[in-house]
Amino acid sequence: MTEDAALEPVTFASPDGKDVYRHSSTHIMAQAVKAVFPSAQLAIGPAIEDGFYYDFAFDRPFTPEDLEKIEARAHEIVKADYPFKRMEMPRQDAIRFFKERGENYKVDILEHIEDQTASLYSQGEFVDLCRGPHVPSTGRIGALKLLSSAGAYWRGDERNPMLQRIYGTSYPTQTELDAYLAKLEEIKRRDHRKLGKELDLITIQDEIGPGLVLWHPKGALIRLVIENFWREQHLKQGYELVYSPHIARLDLWKTSGHVEYYRENMYTPMKLEASEYQLKPMNCPFHIMIYKSHLRSYRDLPIRYGELGTVYRYERTGVLHGLLRVRGFTQDDAHLFCRPDQIEAEVGRVLDFTFFVLRTFGFAEFEVCLSTRPEKAVGSLENWAQATGALEAALKGRGVAYQIDPGEGVFYGPKIDIKIKDVLGRAWQCSTVQIDFNNPERFALAYVAEDGKSHRPIMIHRALMGSIERFFGILLEHYAGAFPTWLAPVQAIVLCITDKQRDYAESVTAQLKTAGYRAEADLRNEKIGFKIREAEKAKIPFMLVVGDREMQAGTVSVRGRSGANLGSLSVPAAIDLIRADVSQALRAQ
RNA sequence: GCUGGCGUAGCUCAAUCGGCAGAGCAGCGGUUUUGUAAACCGCAGGUUGGAGGUUCGAUUCCUCUCGCCAGCUCCA
C-alpha cells in the first residue's frame, strides 16, 4: 500500500470476503486445469453464491475422472502456498501477452474493456487477467472441492461457442465444506420430483407428455385444500370469482398482442369451422372481456376478478423441471380494474393479502423487487412514473424492504415480484403484481367517470402463488413432504394392534371423520411396528394406536409424526389435539 | 433449443469381453394375532423407452427418435 487509504479487513464471514476467497479458489482451479490440460484456454471464472466456476475452451467435455485429477492438482497448489502477485500493464501489452499464450478469450475480454491499464494476477507459473483482489497466497484456501462440469455459452449467448464449465466450492475448514455438502444432500432428499412420486401425490409421465402433470388422489386432495382456502379468502377480500374457457379464437390473442409478442410460447392454433382457435397461455383477455360485457361506472371500480385459470405454454424442452417449470399449469390469477388514483391502495391490499397467504402456508421470509421501465415499453412516461410511484408508496407504506431492478419491468408496466425463501434459504419467485397500460388500450377499456366522460381504467395483474404446480412443488420441498396438518392428505391414521380391535378402530376412524378430519384406518394383519413405519413414510401427522388396553378404556394412544409420544387420550381429546394443530397453523400469521 | 450424461420389473438398482436378463422392496397366496420405523415361506412380475442397422447372436456396438438428469439460454 503506497498511499493513505482506508483499510478494511475482509474475512470469510462477510459476503465480500467469501467472494475474494472463492475468486482465489477459482484461480487455483484454473491453474490446476492448465497444469493437467495445457491446451485448455481460459475464459472467465467468477465467484458465485456457495462457490465458484471457471469456463474453459477445451476440445471435449471434462469427465469425472478429469475433475479428480484437477482437484488433486489444485490441492497440491494450495499446499505449495504460492503468493498471489498483482501486476499492471498497458492494455495493448496485456493483449499481446495473452495472444502469445494463445488465450484468445482473454484477448477478447481485453478488447472489450475501456481501461487502458489491465491488471494481472499470478500465482506460481499461472497468470490470469483479473481485477482482483485475492487472498495473500494459495495456502489460505482450507478446503476446496470440485463439484460438477457442464457446457456453458461464451458470454452466456447461445449463438456463441460452448465452453466447458467446472463448478466448485471452497471453505476455510473441512467441517464447513462438509456442512455444505450435507446441505446439498438435504436438497436432494427434499427434491419434490422424488417426494411427489414416493408420497404418490403427482406424476409426470412420458405417455401423457412432458410438462403435463397428473394429480393423484393425495396430491389432488392437498390441491383442493389449497384451492378452497384460496377461494374463501378471495371472496373475503372482495374479489369476484370467474371461470373462462381453455381455448378462444385466435383473433382474441391478436387483439391482446400475444400473437405478436408471445407466439413462441404458445401452442400452435387449431383450425375449426373456418376460424382458428388458440389454447390459452394467459387468462387476462377473458377477464377483460367480462369487464367489457357492459358499461362500467367509476362507482363500480375497483373491480377484482379472480380465477384459478389453467394455461398452456410451450416451453423449450430443456427448461422443463418437475413441477417448477411445466407446460400446463394453473395460475391463481386475478385482474383488478381501477382508476389511476386507486392504484396505490389496490396494490397495498394485494401486498397485505399476499403476505397473509404466504405466511399461512408457512413462509416467513421474502425478497421483494420493484422493476421499473425497460427500454422498450408502451405507455407514457408520466403513466410509468405515476404507477411506479404508486407501487413504491404501497411498499413504503407497509415498511416492506425491497430492492429496485432498474429496467426489468415488463414492456406494458412496472411490477413488484415477491420471492419466498424456503426452509433451506432458497428463494423462489411466486407472487407478482403488474401494472398494465397496454391491455386497457388494446381492448379500449373504459368507465364513465363523474364528469360523464369515458376514461381508461388501469389494469393490475396479480398472482399470489404464481402457479399452483410450482407452489405445490415448493411447499413439498419446504416441508420435505411432511405437510402441516391442515394440508396433509391424511391427517390421522388409526392402527389396530390385532384384529380384535378392528371394530373399535373403525369406530374411532368414523368419529374422526364425523368431526371433519381426514382419517384412515390400517386394519391389516401386520405388526404394529410395520404399520407405524408405513405411516411414518407416508408422513401422516397423527397415528392413533388402539390395542386391548385402549379398547377397554375407550382411548387411543397418540403418536405424533417422527416418534413423539402424545399419550393415551380419549377420542374427543385426540380430536381436540388435531383441531388445535389445524387451527394454530391457520391462525399463526 | 444447445452441450454432456442417462433410459433394464410398479420403485431402487445388478448383469465381466457381444453369449440363457437378476436382486431387494412393493404386489399376490399362505403361515403368523402381533404394543410404537421392516415377521416368515412361496408365487408372479420384462418386446431392456421406441424404430432401424451391424452380427450366428445385441441390455451391451452404430444411426435416428422420444423422454429424463445437470448446466447454459429462457421463465409462473
Image (spheres, coloured by chain):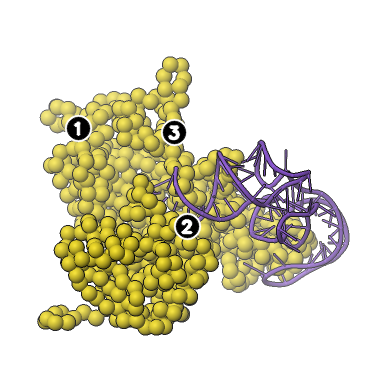
Chain colours: A yellow, B purple
Badge 3 element: loop
Q: Quadrant of the C terminus of chain A?
A: bottom left
Pick the quarter of the image with the N terminus of chain A. Answer: bottom left
Q: Residues within 10 Å of mark 3 (few under 14, many from 20)?
A: some
Separation of disc 3 and disc 2 at Cα?
36 Å
The residue that mark 1 highlights is A456
Based on the displayed image, in which of its 4 quarters is residue A330 positioned? top left
| Labelled pair 3, 2 in contact (Cβ < 8 Å) | no
Give the chain letter at badge 1.
A
Q: Give percent across and percent down for residue A488.
A: 54, 56
Amino acid type, mark 3: Tyr
| Residue A159, image x, y percentages | 35, 46
Residue type at numbered disc 1? Arg
Give coordinates of residue A218: x percent, y percent.
58, 50
Please give the chain letter of the residue carrying mark 2: A
Q: Identify residue type, mark 2.
A: Arg
Tell me whether the residue at label 1 lies in contact with that at label 2, contact meaning CB atoms closer than 8 angstroms.
no
Image vertical order of residue A412 relative to residue A445, above or below:
below
**Do pointers 3 and 1 mark residues of a single chain?**
yes
User: Height in image: A388 above or below A170?
Assistant: above
In this view, A92 is above or below A27 = above
Write down the residue under mark 3. A267
Q: Residue at x 71, y 65 (%)?
A: A530
Between discs 3 and 2, the one toward the N terminus: 2
Q: Please identify, in this view, whether the residue under mark 3 or under mark 2 is nearer the observer.
A: 2
Mark on residue A60? 2
Check disc 2 and report its element: helix, strand or loop.
loop
Crowding at label 2, few (<14), some or many (≥20) Cα neighbours within 10 Å? few
